[in-house]
Image (cartoon, rainbow, N blue to C red):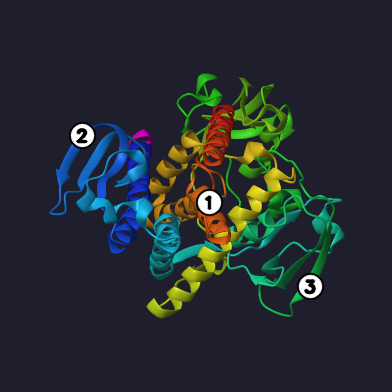
Amino acid sequence: MSALYMIVGTLIALGVLVTFHEYGHFWVARRCGVKVLRFSVGFGTPLVRWHDRQGTEFVIAAIPLGGYVKMLDEREGDVPAELAEQSFNRKTVKQRFAIVAAGPVANFALALVFFWLVAMLGSQQVRPVIGAIEAGSLAQTAGLQVGEEIVAVNGKATSGWSAVNLQLVRRLGESGELLITTRPVEGGTDTLHRVELNDWLRGANEPDPIASLGLRPWRPSLEPVLAEFDPEGPAQGAGMQVGDRLLALDEQPLTDWQDLVDRVRGLPGKTVSIAVERNGQRIDIPVTLASKGEVEAATGYLGAGVAPAQWPAKMMREVSYGPLQAISEAGARTWTMSVLTLDSLKKMLFGELSVKNLSGPITIAKVAGASAESGLGDFLNFLAYLSISLGVLNLLPIPVLDGGHLLYYLVEWVRGRPLSERVQGWGMQIGISLVIGVMLLALVNDLGRL
């Protein structure tokens, strides 16, 4: 079922985002009087095609990894004299700028709509209450306490752990003061804590901001009784069974399920002995743990799970907005994620954030499937984030991307004439090389995560 969600989720995500992006170009081109020859979603062999009354051919093609809008242009072939004024190249710099910018703008608009829907649908969030603090950690040094709720990070309100994580991610690779405001879980006076950062997680692969501060979120205690398995995981392969109660790991008693998880994560690829209670008898089972993630930051993996616990009502929070409030919330989220995406790219460029955090089509497909399986709200959130990423990336001033064309038009507007064909050709070659290089890097990162 997960594979089906991944396939369907990916097709819907790419189909919606690409179509909307290209429709932005198409819609503005029509309003500027440009004749659109083809509107294609996907590349390669056309699967479905039709024409509208203005002669535009609409195509759904076999390879759903992008799309394009082909416009009448005298630089690409002969144009009948009666249609010359409908050529893209005949339009003013402002019109051409608007047509090209419309694609990324459409992505930001789509993200705004998705975030608006998510805000109105509402969500149930776990209150960001601290469950444990690592000795000697940044959190302990700053005076944070177990049982406190994190109510703000750097002055930004945090309704759940995802909001905490988002604010922390914005500080990756940086030095300086991080402000964390806490409040006793039962209510009381707020306390401001100052955390001193020094090149925090600079260049780290797959950083975990919350854990790196030495924080562990509060969660209800889980009995270490196995309830499910990964069919290809080491636990089932070693002979563990549903109903087994885990007693010890390498002769060290286990207090609860989280205790096992924490210890297993630090033992990638190791062979351990896990004591279980089955039908009233103790059995010691040797298990060779799997390894997940990059080699430098690999974590151990058992491939087993327990039944979910019931969360106390006081630890949950329902967050939702009315139609008007949701507009403001959607705008804030769109702006925040746009700035974060651009800032992350800048940090990768200057080495503050590892390029191994760059994701490609495999990771996108996996996240699409997982979010689709989680529910409508999570899937809409994913679509919004992906739409913002597509919009930001396309605005980068790299020839071959929309941003590269916009850069050319700005230069043309300042100079009063366009750059020479030769200079533009060099730019295109450099741009294509950069884009292919980044795509290969993202694919290598994806393969390393499998």
Number of the front mark, 3 or 1: 1
Q: Quadrant of residue 177?
A: bottom right
The N terminus sits in image quarter: top left
**Local crowd at mark 3 within 10 Å, few (<14), some, or many (≥20)?**
some
Magenta segment boundaries in residue numbering:
1-5
Q: Residue 408: which disc?
A: 1
Corner quadrant of residue 204: top right
Which residue is label 2 attached to? 47
For the residues labelled 3 and 1, say whether their Cβ atoms are less than 8 Å apart.
Answer: no
Q: Which residue is mark 3?
A: 192
Where is residue 352? Give x, y as percent.
75, 46
Asked whether 3 falls inside the magenta stretch, the response is: yes
Whether residue 219 appears in this view of the structure is no
Measured in 3D between alpha carbons, the distance from the residue under mark 1 to the one under mark 2, in whole angstroms, is 35 Å
Between circles 1 and 2, the one closer to the viewer is 1
The answer to which of marks 3 and 1 sits earlier in the sequence is 3
